[in-house]
Image (cartoon, helix red, strand yellow):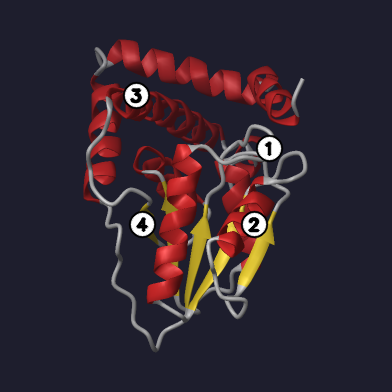
Amino acid sequence: MSARHAHRLRLLRDTDALQGLGVALLLLMLSGGLVYVYYAIRVWNLARRAPAWPDLDPQRRARLLLFGKRCEDGEPDRDFQQRIQRALALAGRHPQLELLLLGGGPHPTEAEVAERELRAAGLSEAARITLEDQSRDTLENLRHARSLLREGEGDVLLLSSRYHLARCSLFAQWLGIEHRVCAAEEQWAPSWRERGRLLLEAAYMVWVESGRAWARLLRSERMLAKVS
């Protein structure tokens, strides 16, 4: 079993996560599915509107958080390649941009793969890169990144695939990270596969938001610590 699969299995065995799932299912039934519709619209709108070329002040510090993606045999798939190419293009346009590459896993980690691909594609040796290679999922990505960011010092960009941006933004809000989003894809032109991913993301967001609301209602420090 891979480390990532083992991590996911631990999450599914987590009683707090299962409580959140139960609350989410109850809300879905009581609302007649309207809760899900709300999140589906939210995920869809952010995916559609996210800029691929965010405006940055050249005189202001900026950090770009590049989210990794599971690699088979150390080779990035199409989604991950798009994220890497967008980071490369932004770094070329904005020399002041600092790159924080996120993603753990077995060697080579997702962060290491991103650095390797960026260098191979011609990223300047002078480019400032930091690797965060201990995390296993999006929330851990941002939790570990938070310790590497200093508050109040420049813009923070979250770079990922359009279908993934709503989750990234939600978790960043939970962790108190002021940010803007940036899409890996140049244009909004979702395939049927990507539309399916958007719908799955909406379902996941119903689950995690319901679980967090339940934890706050219970005032459970143990549960809240898992999402902060």
Instruction: Give the mark, 1 or 3, whose residue is nearer the N terminus.
Output: 3
Instruction: Give the mark, 3 or 2, whose residue is nearer the N terminus.
Output: 2
In this picture, is 228 found above or below 5? below
Instruction: Name the quadrant of the N terminus.
Output: top right
**Which residue sits at x=25%, y=36%?**
44
Quarter of the image holding residue 101? bottom right
The CA span between labels 2 and 4 is 21 Å
Element under disc 3? helix
Q: How crowded is the residue under tag 2: few (<14 C-alpha within 10 Å), some, or many (20+)?
A: few
In this rendered view, identify the residue nearer to me: 28 or 82: 82
**Left of 19 or right of it: where is 5?**
right
**Which residue sits at x=69%, y=30%?**
4
Q: Which residue is mark 2?
A: 116
The CA span between labels 4 and 1 is 33 Å
Instruction: Give the mark, 3 or 4, whose residue is nearer the N terminus.
Output: 4
In this picture, is 11 found above or below 112? above
Instruction: Give the mark, 1 or 2, whose residue is nearer the N terminus.
Output: 2
Instruction: Give the mark, 2 or 4, whose residue is nearer the N terminus.
Output: 2
x and y percentages locating residue 200 in the rendered image: 39, 24
Q: How crowded is the residue under tag 3: few (<14 C-alpha within 10 Å), some, or many (20+)?
A: few
Q: Which residue is mark 1?
A: 222
Q: Nearer the viewer, mark 1 or mark 3?
A: 3
x and y percentages locating residue 93 in the rendered image: 37, 75
Instruction: Give the mark, 4 or 1, whose residue is nearer the N terminus.
Output: 4
Q: Which residue is mark 3?
A: 193
Q: Which residue is mark 4?
A: 182
In this rendered view, identify the residue nearer to me: 158 or 171: 158
